[in-house]
Image (cartoon, helix red, strand yellow):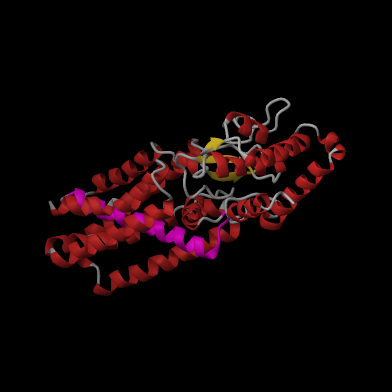
Amino acid sequence: MARTLLFSLASFSVASLLLYFLGIASFVTLAIALLLIEIAGIAYLSATNAQMKSLIIPGIWAGLIATFAYDLVRVPIVQSGVPVFKAISYFGTTLLGVDRPTAASEFAGWAYHLSNGVSFALMYVALVPKPGLITAVLWGLLLEGIMLLTPYAEVFGYQRDARFLSITIGSHAVFGLVLWLGLKYWPAVPKYAFAAAALGVPAALAGMSWDFSSRYAQKIPPSPPPYVGAGLYTTWSVPEPDRILALWVTQKFVEPTARFHFIEPFEKLRFGKPFDVPEAEVRRHGLKSATQYVLETRKLNKDDRLAKLERLARMTNFTEVSPWMLASDPEAGRLAETVRNLAANHCGKSLSARCLPQLTAAIDKWYDGGLE
């Protein structure tokens, strides 16, 4: 019973990632909640059950050095030009909701990565009464096999090719091998070695993080969104008036819980429903702008707001469908310029999830003020 409880608690770390893939909640909500439960539960088990403590302490030790070895063997690959650590950077950017890696997001990402490594080791010691070389290596490979069944590669932008598989299979085999060695020689480990690993492994991973970030932080694609469940839409980051107003109308009048993720034009859509891109339902249709399409198909209430919305829709038709006609309608020209200025003031040259709340709030204020 106690082993089952330890295994279950140790699985909470990676469970936050799997539940994020399923769209249950945002990654940061899941990670914080489940990691706190895991840490508290394992600490309680260790303090109240001597048998469990005899598994937990060596499990943490072996998990630390196995995670270090798992990453160490990939360092030469990073230095050869392959950004194999980008998933760890994405852990951090997704947790903190930033587009590009920062010092804070790198710390968060590598800390979460280390928590997974230690948790996998604890799951192994809880599952296998007598650790062995074969079972430990198979455990490492099983972890990767399960991850390959999830959208892990797609969400974090890996290509499932021979190179990817050889790197990930090899490094997980090393994780299992060092996990077994750590557990086998634990009785002979000096007392100070546990503290040394608890301090040294995070420091070594911090060095790997710094090296990777200095090489690739500005080269890897923008971060996945913090949430990938229902109600997420993906669109291009170009701040065109029609796109801005189509998503604003959708969020304000049609689907208030809608979230938007932005990518570069023609970048592959890996998550969310397409929005105002060639394959989307909501987009320009013939002589109708995307904003006009939303207004006509979503059946908004015909009250005093509709007249204002129709003025905006007319403007988006001019800017998106027949820009040569914009000069013939001074009001449409002023409206388009206002939308562009609001976008430039709050988002700069590219739309992003980070600036969107400020932009939509500014449009709300402008709209409620009469579009003046």
Image: 231 above or below 48: above
Residue 22 visible, this orientation: yes
- Magenta-highlighted residues: 99-128
Q: Residue at x 51, y 51 (%)?
A: 86
* Residue in view at x 72 percent, y 39 percent: 311
Q: Which is more toward the observer, 201 or 95? A: 95
- Point out residue 342 in the picture as x, y percentages from the top left corner: 71, 53
Q: Quadrant of residue 265?
A: top right
Task: Determine whether, in the image, residue 164 is placed left or right of residue 173.
Answer: right
In the image, 199 versus 240, the foreground residue is 240
Residue at 23% x, 65% y: name it: 43
Image side of residue 12 versus residue 213, left or right: left
Q: Where's residue 319, x and y in %?
A: 77, 38
Q: Is residue 124 magenta?
A: yes
Residue at left 61%, top 38%? 303
Q: Main secondary structure of the magenta part?
A: helix
Q: Is residue 201 left or right of residue 214?
A: left
* Res 130 visible: no
State the image coordinates of residue 128 (x, y, percent, origin top left): 19, 48
Question: Is residue 218 placed above or below 245 in the rendered structure?
Answer: below
The residue positioned farthest toward the bottom in the image shown? 192
Magenta includes 108?
A: yes
Residue at the front extreme of this rendering: 304
Query: Which of the 4 quarters of the picture holds residue 29?
Result: bottom left
Please give left or right for residue 218 compared with residue 324 in the image.
Answer: left
* Residue closest to the eye, 326 or 218: 326
Q: Residue furthest top?
A: 286
Number of marks: 0
Q: Please state the horizontal and vertical placement of residue 364, each as a whole percent of the image.
A: 63, 51
